Every structure is written in structure tokens, then in C-alpha cells.
Image (tube, rainbow, N blue to C red):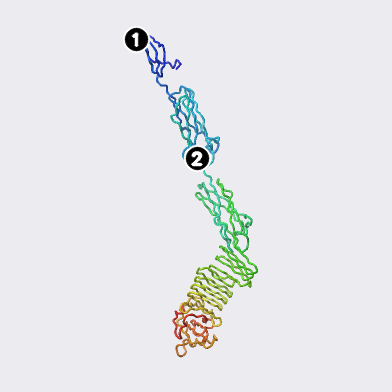
Amino acid sequence: DGTAAGTVLVKDIRPGSYGSYPFSLTAVGNTLFFTANDGVNGWELWALNVGTPAIPTLAIAATSANQTEGNSGSKAFTFTVTRADNTTGSNNVNWAVTGSGSNPANATDFVGGVLPSGSVSFATGETSKVITVDVQGDTTVELNENFTVTLSNATNGATITTATATGTIQNDDVAVPTLTIAATSASQTEGNSGSKAFTFTVTRGDNTTGSNNVDWAVTGSGSNPANATDFAGGLLPSGVVSFAPGESSKVITVDVQGDTTVELNENFTVTLSNPTNGATITTATATGTINNDDFIGTSGPDTLVGTSGADAMTGLAGNDTYTVNDAGDLVIEALNQGTDTVQASIFYTLPNNVENLLLTGTGNLNGTGNGLNNQITGNSGNNNLNGAAGNDSLNGAAGNDTLNGAAGRDTLTGGTGTDIFIFRFGQSTAAARDRVTDFAIGTDKIDLLSQAGAAINAPLAFTRATDSTTTNINTIVANVFTDANGATAGNQALGTNSAVLVRVANTTTTYLIINDGTAGFQSANDLVINLTGLTGTLPALGTIAVNSFFV
């Protein structure tokens, strides 16, 4: 190898103490030809096979290449390139980093924002070199990322036996809790009284392992901002939302104060602030809208139509018409401001100073009057109509209806269908008689209530008296209490808990008179009902089947 230390005995051509030396050295491939004297055969041609020189081999391996990246600065990931088999010369080899695996690293993961590369140089005798890949620290939450260092382009005949080694950048960043707010039920009418809950949802994401608090506060917003008087308690609401470990959702409830003031729709904003324990707010605001549900008419006739929520409607003077579709709707009328009508598609009781009620739609609805002289009309469903106080006019229209005029002198019309007329002792008397305009014999029925308003049984006996030749109601009543059975000779007095039917001769008027549980005529209690529109066959004089007229 050119040095004394590297000189070796190839072959002792001439054994013993005698020397020999070669002449005419000629190399052919890996064979050296020469002449030499071995002391036995003289000068001869010799051949020496010197063999094939070893080829340098290069291999790469990860040494410190599976680490966290840190939150800032850089961290060294190292790989070792080893040279073996022949280190007598020099060799260079290139290396380059590429992302790899299911979640590959990219340029931003390395210092300088580029994928690292370079070369390794081996001097004579060197067997090992270190490649350092500087990974950039950050605070981004991400999956573990992989990269590969690949060797290429080895020089001076070297071969690469292991060309690649892999590094893993392990995530060391904990997700920061994020808070967002969104309106859930925050665009509503306010109602006419009390309060209504407007709701907003605060959602915690990314990290729910710890606890977090966040403040919230309401402010008026938009072109017509809400103010403190629009909220329960007369203050702009505020508060704190608290998340315990594992909780991801909380509801903020803002109580809006109901009123009957006509005003524009009003807006307000709920704003989050001051999150604790490192949380961040990604959506800080959400908006609510208080929709006006209050309407006011003019001094003339108005038509006021309620919305889908609870509305307050004021018609003022004039004959006004109101459309009501919510149990919370409020109709406001002052005394002597016209003859007003409510059209209702729900169970409804007329408020003060409103005269008429018309039930709409096809549902089975109840309609109730007030202390005025009401006109109440049913729809096509099976209605239950009650006039309450006043001299009322009730019309069941279509359907199988139940009509109760209650106090006052009332006019009852069942309309089509099988109808029931309710009478309470003391409410349809000789002096203030109710009138049924269309009683259908055999299908329509009479139902009785006690003077206290309790349900009672039908009369024990029912007869038809001789037709009356007088139209004076007091005389008619006195006559039938004396003789209630026109088919039996002599006087058959009207007994207690008994009823009598009597027609006025040569007229279309027929009276149904019912004695209560007290013998004799009680003018303040016994029932006297005027049946002016009987249809069907009038029963003959004498006994009548109770169930043909009564429930």
C-alpha cells in the first residue's frame, strides 16, 4: 500500500535464506505476471492473483429521529450514515428529506420553511457521519407527522445498501378549548304579559377535559335596538356560563318582558367575553329579535289579524274585526267603540266590550260570550257555545253542537246536525224566556242543569197539554200547571220534576215548561222555553216519551 507498514510477504518463492526478486512485472486484470528464480527451477514465469478490491458501502439509520417538536425554536432530529467494507478512499453521498406515511410532514415543519437536503463527505478512513434535520417547533395541534431521509448519488464507486430512514415528529400540543355562541330560539314575539324565554347555545369544542367559564352580556343592536325595559326585571341581562370537565354545551336564557305596546321589531346581541383557563372565543356574538305582536287600529272599522304568536290588538273606535289564532292573543276594546267581531280558530271567550264571536275552521271548538248581548256563531265542527250573561244569539251552524244561552233572554239556533240545548233552572223563566228557533223533534235534545249549575236527570214525566187559546204566557203557565195532560179528562196537575209541551192554537209557537223539584209554579226558577221552529211531528196530546226530547 506504499508504506513500510503496509508491506506484506506475498510468496516465499525461494525458501531458506536465499533471496529472490521478480523481473518484468505485468498486470492483467487482477493477475500480476512476473519472472523469478526459486532456486530450484531457475527463472520462470509466475502469476499472482491479487483479488478484487472491496467496494465501500453506505447505510443510513435513524438515531434520534422520533421526538416531539417543541413549541418554538428548532429541535435536532439525527440520522447516522455508516461507511463499511472499504474506507481507503473518499466518498460523498447526497441526502434529502421528503414527507411520508399517512400524515406526511411538509416544508413548514422544518426550519427555514423548506424540506432539508445536503451531502455527507467521508475522508479516507472515516466510517460514520451524522445528518442533522432541524424540525421547527410550533403550538399547532396536529397528528404525528412522518418524514424520510433518502441517500442518493454516492461517489467513487460506493454503493448504498440502506438508502432510507424515517423520522416521526410527535405532536406535543394540547388543543385549546374553543367557545362559540349561536341563537337557538331567539326570534320570537314577546307576548302580552309575563316573560318569554329567548335561548342561545354556547358550545365548547376541541378540548373539554378541564373547566372553563365565560361571561355573557346583552346589548341592544341593529337599527331598532332593544333596551332594558324590554327584558324581565327592567335590566339588560348578563351572566356567566360555566363548563365542568366533559361538558360541551350550555344554554343561555334571556327573559324578554311581554307587553301590549305597539313597537317595531327590536334586536339585541348576546356577547361572550373573558374566557378562563386558556379558552378562546371563536364566535363571540349572536343576535335575537323581539318581534312585535301588538297592533292598533284607527278610528274607523279595522281588520286586525294576529300573527302566529301571542298578539295584542287594539281596534279603537269603529266596527272592528279581529282574527285570533293563539291562546295568548289579546283583544283590547274600550266601551262604546263600535260593534266588534272576533274570528277565532281556537277555543275562545270574548273579552270585555267585544260583542260578536265567529268560530272558523273545521275544528271542534268552544266559544263563550261575555256580559254583552253577544252573537256567537259556530263553524262546521262540533261546537260548544255558551252565551254567558246578556241577551245572546247563538248559532251552532254545521256540526253536532251544544248550545247554552246561560243568563239573559237568549235565542238559540242549532243549525244542521244533532244538537243539544242546555237550560239551567232560573235562567229561562216566564218573564225572560229563551227561544229555540229550530228544534228537530227526535234528533235534537234538551239537557238540564240545576239552579246551582250542576247536571241533573231528565224529568220523570213528560206530557202534552191541550192547545192554549190564549197567547198570554202567564195564563198559559197557570193553565198547564193546573192540567198538564190533554188526553185525560179532568185536571192532571204538573207534578214536580215534570215537563209539559203546550202549543198556542193557530200559531207556530210551542212552549216547553218544566217544573223543578218544588210543587207549584216557581216564577224565578221553573223553566219556560219558547220553541218557535219545531221540525218533525209534534207528539199527540197526553204522555210523551221523555227521551224523545231530553238527554
- Look at label 1 and name its amino acid: Asn
Comparing 158 with 221, the one in front is 158
Give residue 357's quadrant in the image: bottom right
Q: Residue at x 42, y 23 (%)?
A: 54
Marking on residue 171: 2
Q: Residue at x 62, y 72 (%)?
A: 338
Q: Which residue is the site of mark 1?
A: 41
| Image vertical order of residue 67 relative to residue 251, above or below | above
Q: Looking at this rendering, what residue extends furthest in the bottom direction? A: 490
Q: Is residue 529 visible?
A: no
**Marks 1 and 2, how far apart at CA:** 79 Å
| Image vertical order of residue 250 relative to residue 443, above or below | above
Q: Looking at this rendering, what residue extends furthest in the front direction? A: 28
Comparing 102 with 157, the one in front is 157
Residue 72 spot, x, y in % from top left: 55, 37
Give the SS element for disc 2: loop
CA neighbours of label 1 inside 10 A, class few (<14), some (14 to 19), many (20+): few
Comparing 360 with 326, the one in front is 360
Image quadrant where one finds the N terminus: top left
Tag 1 near tag 2, CB within 8 Å: no
Give the SS element for disc 1: loop
CA neighbours of label 2 inside 10 A, class few (<14), some (14 to 19), many (20+): some
Q: Looking at this rendering, what residue extends furthest in the right direction? A: 299
